[in-house]
Image: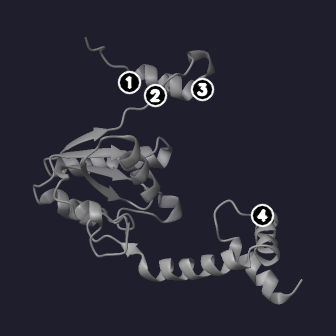
Amino acid sequence: MTALLEQLIEALRVLPGVGRKSAQRMAYHVLERGRDGGRQLATVLAEAVERIGHCSQCRDFSETPVCATCASASRDRQQLCVVESPADRLAIETATGYRGLYYVLQGRLSPLDGIGPRELGLDALATRLASGEVAELIVATSATVEGEATAHYLAQLARQHGVRPSRLAQGLPLGGELEYVDRGTLSHAFGSRGEMRE
């Protein structure tokens, strides 16, 4: 194997979920059958890495200092949904009718990994909450231990600034059969049950 081929394989391994074998398969495919696609990928990747940064207001990916969502006059500025990643923001945006704004943490609190409030931009979030524009902080973090710790921290931060915190409902999946739901999910859903509406 040539040194350059080895470098290509190692470079492809930086992608999540791509091990040595997958990277090798990709490299061989590009060199055997997809050289035009490889050139296009290299060009677009280089341009994206150079030009895409973060929105100064919500920290989502953006080519401009303020993203289109934050710049939109039609969004409800009293609602702010906090998510862990740009992928989470996109999921909420495409699956719901939510018309408020977002704040993307780019992670979750994890002291063992050295990720604290500063790394998540929570100082900027606190400043935003202190401005008085936000009435409700919708916490949409994952149901992991770190996600729950982050949710708790965000709720406290919201209350300190007189903002009402809310949390996405969690529990049984739509169309799920109780006998097939894992014990942790069933226990959480049972413990956080609510009154049925008419």
Q: Residue furthest right?
A: 1
Q: Are marks 1 and 4 in contact (CB under 8 Å)?
A: no
* Label 3, label 1: how far apart the Cα atoms are: 16 Å
Q: Are marks 3 and 1 in contact (CB under 8 Å)?
A: no
* Label 1, label 4: how far apart the Cα atoms are: 42 Å
Q: Earlier in the sequence, mark 1 or mark 4?
A: 4
Residue 17, how many percent across, how many down?
68, 59
How packed mark 1 is, by other alpha carbons closer than 10 Å (few <14, some 14-19, many 20 or more), is: few
How packed mark 4 is, by other alpha carbons closer than 10 Å (few <14, some 14-19, many 20 or more), is: some
* Label 3, label 2: how far apart the Cα atoms are: 10 Å
| For residue 187, side relative to residue 15 (left or right) | left
Q: Quadrant of the N terminus?
A: bottom right
Q: Amino acid at mark 4?
A: Ser
Residue under label 2: 171
Q: Quadrant of the C terminus?
A: top left
* Label 4, label 3: how far apart the Cα atoms are: 32 Å
Q: Which residue is rendered at x = 20% and y = 53% of the image?
A: 75
Residue under label 3: 182
- Please name whichever residue, 186 or 112, is drawn nearer the observer in this view of the structure: 186
Q: Amino acid at mark 2?
A: Gly
* Pair 1/4: label in front: 4
